[in-house]
Image (spheres, rainbow, N blue to C red):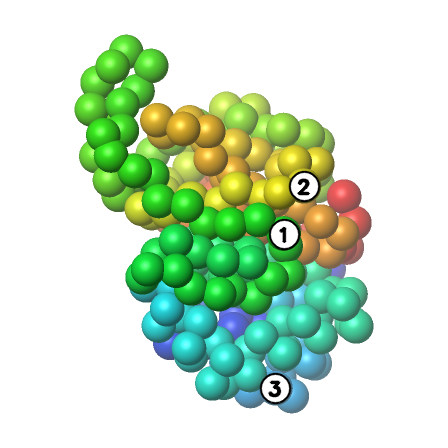
Amino acid sequence: MSGTVAVIDYGMGNLHSVESALQHVGADQVVVTHDADLIRQADRVVFPGVGAIRDCMAEIRRLHCDQLLDTALREQHKPVLAICVGMQALMQRSEENDGVDCLGLIDGDVRHFGAPLTDADGQRLKVPHMGWNGVQQARPHALWQGIPDGERFYFVHSYYVHAQNRDLVAGSVQYGVSADAALARDNLFAVQFHPEKSHRAGLQLLRNFLDWNGTC
């Protein structure tokens, strides 16, 4: 069902690892691009991101990727998967870089983990949150198909998402605080972790994305 998958390239993502993972799970064609025509013609869209949010937002807007993403979501209603900083960019505002306005596609903010950060036993936790952690599924979704609740995914982030509408939360992760690990709304699924680095579970999520028709 996958057809063509467009991975939006604004110079700030693990683009080739995402591309390789999608190809590995059976994508018919993967294009890494910011070309408007190619993204509009694609059957589904991946919106990745790595790095400082200020730089990401500057490039997203300079290349008009914000408009392309909005078109894919609201006009074309095609399945969209946002990853890591791609997820954070969807929110209204981030605390990073002394405060940065984001795309505002989802009500909520991006917060710093803060310090000192401790686990349930009082042990100090390092920031960034880097490594494997279990994701608690908040509600059923097509992208969770074949993935057990509590499955571990790979994270690398110093800031975390908090959505205002808690009904949008599809998964959470505990790291000193409860952070939104996955959000789902209509044809959008967004994850803080890196499915392309998360071995079996991550590949299963990407496989599910290729089969997803954009409804929960």
Residue at image location 62% in from the left, 42% down from the top:
164
Q: Which of disc 3 and disc 1 is earlier in sequence?
A: 3
> Tag 2: residue type?
Asn
Residue at image location 53% in from the left, 26% down from the top:
136
Spot occupied by residue 182 in the image (x, y as percentages of width and height): 56, 42
Is disc 2 in contact with disc 3, using a CB cutoff of under 8 Å?
A: no
Residue position marked by numbered label 2 in the rendering: 165
Between the residue at mark 1 and the residue at mark 3, the CA separation in whole angstroms equals 26 Å
Residue position marked by numbered label 3 in the rendering: 36
Spot occupied by residue 176 in the image (x, y as percentages of width and height): 35, 26
> Tag 1: residue type?
Asp
Q: In the picture, which quadrant includes the C terminus?
A: top right
Q: Which of disc 1 and disc 2 is earlier in sequence?
A: 1
Q: Which of disc 3 and disc 2 is earlier in sequence?
A: 3
Q: In this view, does 98 lie to the left or right of 36?
A: left
Residue position marked by numbered label 1 in the rendering: 107
In this view, 102 is above or below 112: below
Between the residue at mark 2 and the residue at mark 3, the CA separation in whole angstroms equals 31 Å
Is disc 2 in contact with disc 1, using a CB cutoff of under 8 Å?
A: yes
> Tag 3: residue type?
Ala
In this view, 172 is above or below 80: above
In this view, 38 is above or below 100: below
Spot occupied by residue 12 in the image (x, y as percentages of width and height): 37, 70
Residue at image location 55% in from the left, 78% down from the top:
65
